[in-house]
Amino acid sequence: MPKWIVILLISSSSTLASISLIRPMITYRAIEIGATPAQIGALGAVYALFPIVLALFLGKNVGRFGEAKYIVFGASTMFILAIGFAFINSLFLLMVATAAIGISHLIGVVGGQTMISTRSPNEKLDGFFGYYAFGASLGQMVGPLVGGIVAGSDGVLPKSTSMGFLAAAGLALIALLPTFYWRNQKIAIKQTVNQGGTFTAAISMLKKPGMGKAIYISLAVSSAVDVLIVFLPLFGTENNFSPFAVGVILAIRAGTSMFSRIFLGAISQRLGSHFLMVSSIIASTVFCTAMFFARTPLSLGIAVAIAGLALGVGQPLTMSLVSRIAPPEDRALAISARLTANRVGQFIVPASAGAIAGAAGAGSVFLGLAALLASSIFTAL
C-alpha cells in the first residue's frame, strides 16, 4: 500500500474518531441545557448548513492549495473547536460551534476524498475508497467508545460532557501528527478552472449519465448515518439506556461498517458494484425499520449492527462511482458536488427528524430513515 494512503488513513480515522465523539456529546450537552427534540434536530441540521454553500467552493479551490493543506487545516480547526465546546453552556453558542465544526470536518473530507480520487489508478478506486471508508468507520467506532469511557455515566446522561470534548481534542491532535509528511505536497492532477462558474460546472457534471443517481444514493446513505449519530442518544434517554450503552451501539454500527469496507474491493469485483449497492440499500432499509421496534440495548444493537454492515457499503461505492464518471481533471468538483448533496441531506433530514421525534418520539425517526433509503432503491435499479 502506498505511503500516502497509509498516512491518510491514520489522519482520517483519527479525525472521524474526534467528530464521532463530539457529535453525541453535542446532543448530550444540548439535553443538559434543556433543548427540545426539535432544537436537537436543528443542531444536527446546522452542522450541515454552511457546508452546503461551501462544498463546491472548496472543490474549486483544492487545486490551488493542495489536498494536504485542506486535511491539515480541517484537523487543526477541529482541535481548537473541540476545546471550545468544553466551555459552552448556551444553546446559541452550541449552534454556532456546531456550524463551525461542520465546516472544519468538510474541509478535511474534501481534501481526503480528492487525494484518493486523483492519486488512485481507476482499477483500484473501489479498493482505495474502501480503505478510506474503513478508516472512517474505525474512527466512528473508537470515538463513541472513548466518549463513553471518558465522559462516564450518570443515569441516562454523561457525568462530564466537557471531558468528552477534551478527549475529542486529543484525537484531533493525533490526526495532525502524521500530516507533517505532506507539508510540501501538491495536488496530483491539475483540476479544471471553471471559467463559467462553479455552480454552472456542477450542474453540467450532474447531467453526466449516472452521476445524479450516484449522488442521490450518497445523500440517502450519508443522511441515515448522520441521523443515527444525532438521535441514538435521544432514543437512549427515552428508553433509559445509559450513555455507555449508546456509545457501544454507535461503535458497533461503525465496527460492522468497517468490516464491510475492508473487503469492499474484492467483494465488488466478485459480485459487481451495482448488485452490491442495490442489495446493501435493501438491507439497510429493512434494519432501519427494525430499530423502531427495538426496546432494549441488545435488540437495538443487533439491528444497528446489521444496518451498519449494509450502510458501510454505499458511501465508498458512490465515491468510486462519481470519480469514474468524471474525467480526472474534474474529480475534485465531482467529489465536492457529491459532498454538497450529502450536506443538503444532512441539513434537511435531521431537521425533519427533530420535528418527527418531537411529535411521535425518537423511535419514529428510524421509520423516516427507512423511507428515505427505500426511495434510493429505485434510483439504484
Image (spheres, helix red, strand yellow):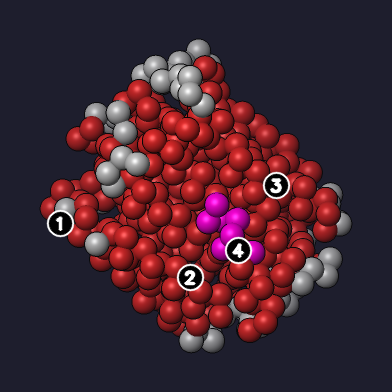
* Dot 2 or dot 4, earlier in sequence: 4
Q: Secondary structure at mark 1?
A: helix
Side (left or right) of 62 relative to 51: left
Res. 326 in view: yes
* Dot 4 or dot 3, earlier in sequence: 3
What segment is highlighted magenta in the picture? 344-351
Q: Residues within 10 Å of mark 2 (few under 14, many from 20)?
A: many
Question: Measured along the vertical axis of the image, is residue 43 above or below residue 171?
Answer: below
Q: Nearer the viewer, residue 98 or 169?
A: 98
Q: Secondary structure at mark 4?
A: helix
Quadrant where the C terminus sits is bottom left
Quadrant where the N terminus sits is top left
As for residue 320 lying within the magenta part, the answer is: no
The CA distance from mark 1 to mark 2 is: 26 Å
Q: Residues within 10 Å of mark 1 (few under 14, many from 20)?
A: few
Most common SS among magenta residues: helix
* Dot 4 or dot 1, earlier in sequence: 1
The CA distance from mark 2 to mark 4 is: 10 Å
Q: Which mark is on residue 350?
A: 4
Q: Find disc 1 in the rendering and name its residue.
A: 271
Q: Nearer the viewer, residue 38 or 131?
A: 38
Q: Find disc 3 in the rendering and name its residue.
A: 99
Side (left or right) of 164 relative to 222: right
Say which amino acid is labelled 1.
Leu
Say which amino acid is labelled 4.
Pro
On the image, the x and y values in percent for residue 259 come to 33, 57
